[in-house]
Amino acid sequence: MDLAVVWFILIAILFIGFFFLEGFDFGVGILLHFLGKTDKERRIIINTIGPFWDGNEVWLITAGGAIFAAYPVWYSTMFSGFYMALLLVLIALILRGVAFEFRSKHESIIWRKIWDCVIFGSSCILSILWGIALANLIKGVPIDNKMNYVGGFFDLISFYTLIAGTATLFIFILHGAIFLSLKTEGAIEQRALKVARSFGLYAIVIALVLIIETFVKTDLYNSKFALSTSILAVIFLCLTWYLIRKEKAKIAMISNGLSIALGVGSLFLGMFPRVMVSNIKPEYSLTIYNAASSHNTLLLMTKVALIFVPIVLAYQTWTYWIFRKRVTGKDLEY
């Protein structure tokens, strides 16, 4: 198989892993203030993702590094074109990390509420921005014949991209609620299940709207594989809602994870072999071939990835296994 194709697949897998893991992470951050009625409950909620949230971001860093090394033209065009949006993402990620670390440094109620608001706001912004970013990749952005982005920040905002941002927001809230129902007990668990039942329906509706808009506004579904994968994603989303109503949270978590994986996967299937679509002229689009590094660079990266990716996967698997139990008030010293 062509190494340019191999790295396209690997980057797709990295983004699938990121959205699956960081999805519930963002969802928990959004739900923190609503499900935690007391400071003790909010501390329990934060502790459910305490061992994981920073490790989950490794997937994003790795994906960004892979794009930089494997497809430098894609990296330069995307990061220059999406500069303001990605700057907002970076600021939100920094503030979110600082909030997790600083929240418990002072006993003041006002101090903790401020950081709770930061966690909520940054998690919301990140959830929406990722949906907008993915939608722009497939909708198309103004890229000229020199592979340069020639638009502005507001060229990234449209009805379609806002629908995509709302979809990722709702799906991440659902994902976070299911995760909390598995990692907490008592009142928090029941509140999380209630939220999951509501947002399961909201997520299904917005996902269907997004598929219709994608069919109308993009050429993504020229690929039958992308269309069938998107339909499967919605089917698993419906299954998730059904399982939550039956209070089968463990299976629902798997089902929702598959829905996220299939949704992100459909994007890459429909774009292939493109990595960024030009809405000026289709032939100006970036592909895995005109944006790729040399064969020797890709070969070296493949050898490095074969060594280090399994190590990262093993470490994260071990982390989730060690901290697999539910979090209670006794665990607040973590």
Image (cartoon, helix red, strand yellow):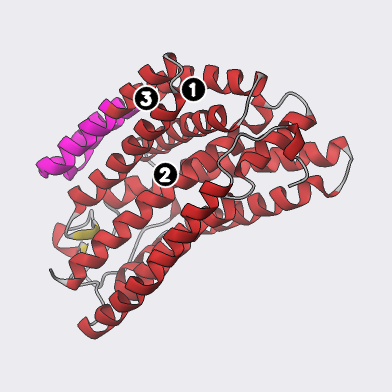
Give the Cα distance between marks 1 and 2: 16 Å
The reply to whether discs 3 and 2 touch (Cβ–Cβ < 8 Å) is no
Percent of width and height locating residue 321: 52, 47
Task: Look at the picture and state if 225 lies above or below 244.
Answer: below
Looking at the image, which residue is at 32% across and 72% down? 306
Name the side, left or right, on which 46 lies relative to 220.
right
Give the Cα distance between marks 1 and 3: 9 Å
For label 2, the SS is: helix
Mark 1 lies on residue: 196
Q: Which residues are magenta?
A: 206-235
Name the side, left or right, on which 217 lies relative to 175.
left
Dominant secondary structure (helix, strand or loop) of the stretch shown in magenta: helix
Mark 3 lies on residue: 240
Q: Is residue 177 visible?
A: yes
Looking at the image, which residue is at 59% across and 45% down? 323
Q: Is residue 288 visible?
A: no
* Disc marking residue 20: 2
Q: Earlier in the sequence, mark 1 or mark 3?
A: 1
Look at the image and say whether residue 285 sits in the magenta stretch: no
Percent of width and height locating residue 5: 18, 65
Q: Earlier in the sequence, mark 1 or mark 2?
A: 2
Identified by mark 3, the residue type is Thr
Find the residue positioned furthest to the top: 246
* Disc marking residue 157: none
Find the residue positioned furthest to the bottom: 296
